[in-house]
Image: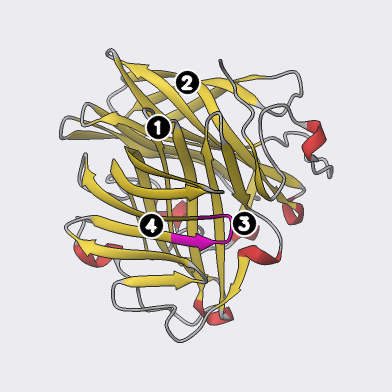
Amino acid sequence: MKYDLSWDKPHTPSGDVLWQESDCYWFYDRAQRIGGFHRIGQKPATGKGQVTLFIFREGGQRFVLSAGPRTEVVLDQDSRQGAKQVVGGHTAQALGNGRMRFTWQEPETDADLEFYEAFHEPRNWSKTGHSDEFMSNINSDGHLECSGRIRGTIRIGTETYTIDGLCHRDRSWGLRDNSRASLHRYRMFSGTVGPELSFASFFLDLKGGPSMVAGFVARNGVDHDVRDLRVIMRMDRDGLTPLGSTGILTLETGEEIRIESNSVQGFLTPVPEANSVSQDHISTFLYNGKVGFLDLEFCINPGRGAYIPEQSDLTFGVIEQGLSQCVLYRD
């Protein structure tokens, strides 16, 4: 299905309690050494919205909002507008031509950002349709992925910065049954270096069902579906924090693309109902002499144990909510 502008605007809910719509994006400005992850989600039938926010400046402060009461927001009559969704002090607004405006307002941090340039046409996970049956459990009505550039202002604590960096965004709407997902082997691997190379991919098991790989690689206006994904991580001594990764993307043509990444900053989100922990790490990689960035998302629970890590268990990653000082992965 070809992208059109309606994909970026709020859609009509079905009334099912499992129906959701979300905007999610991650970014990194290497010059300013600022990056982050931001998700704005809504479940209109339940009257609830959810926010996740991770923002950092290397050598400065970072902020995490990923668990607890502050992440659950009661929706009001202005939460769903013609081109905008609002969850508390967080917004996602379609500006047309694939451009988006994202804002957040929290006592510890705020931002006004514009996704202003796309490196390829926004698209779904698969053009071949091989993931349609699987995705009916995850994003039944629609999904888009797109890499590009983002710019604007961000305040972290008392410091305000102007950024212009690389970004990858996604948007999904429809039924999402999280209880169907088996998160203990989950991987998401998405990023960009520019028009020369962008990619979005994931690996996920369904309980009692198949394993699924979906995604694509876009290079200079030509894109191919991903047939297989392997992500091998280098872990720190805590056994929890990835210092880097090797991603192997196998295209439908049989070509393999290998991405070697190094972690910059990351955060953890406890998922008690799945006896698991989700991690999200902003990383960098080198491709044809250019430095790109990627988001590595995964669960660290192959044994499916019930222990949820505490901050003292970690070296570089962060699980504590609110402002804290960045711990550098590198000098």
The picture quadrant where one finds residue 307 is top right
Specify whether 267 is left or right of 174: right
Residue under circle 1?
Answer: 32
The residues bearing labels 3 and 2 have C-alpha atoms spaced at a distance of 30 Å
Residue under circle 4?
Answer: 171
Please give the label number shown on residue 172. Answer: none
The residues bearing labels 4 and 3 have C-alpha atoms spaced at a distance of 20 Å
Residue under circle 3?
Answer: 180
| Front position in the image: 133 or 82 | 82
Local packing at callout 4 (Cα closer than 10 Å; few below 14, some 14-19, many 20+) is many
2 or 1: tag closer to the N-terminus: 1
Q: Tell me: residue 82, above or below residue 200.
A: below
The magenta segment is 104-109
Query: What type is the residue that disc 3 sits on?
Result: Arg
The picture quadrant where one finds residue 194 is top left
Query: What type is the residue that disc 2 sits on?
Result: Ser
**Foreground mark, 3 or 2?**
2
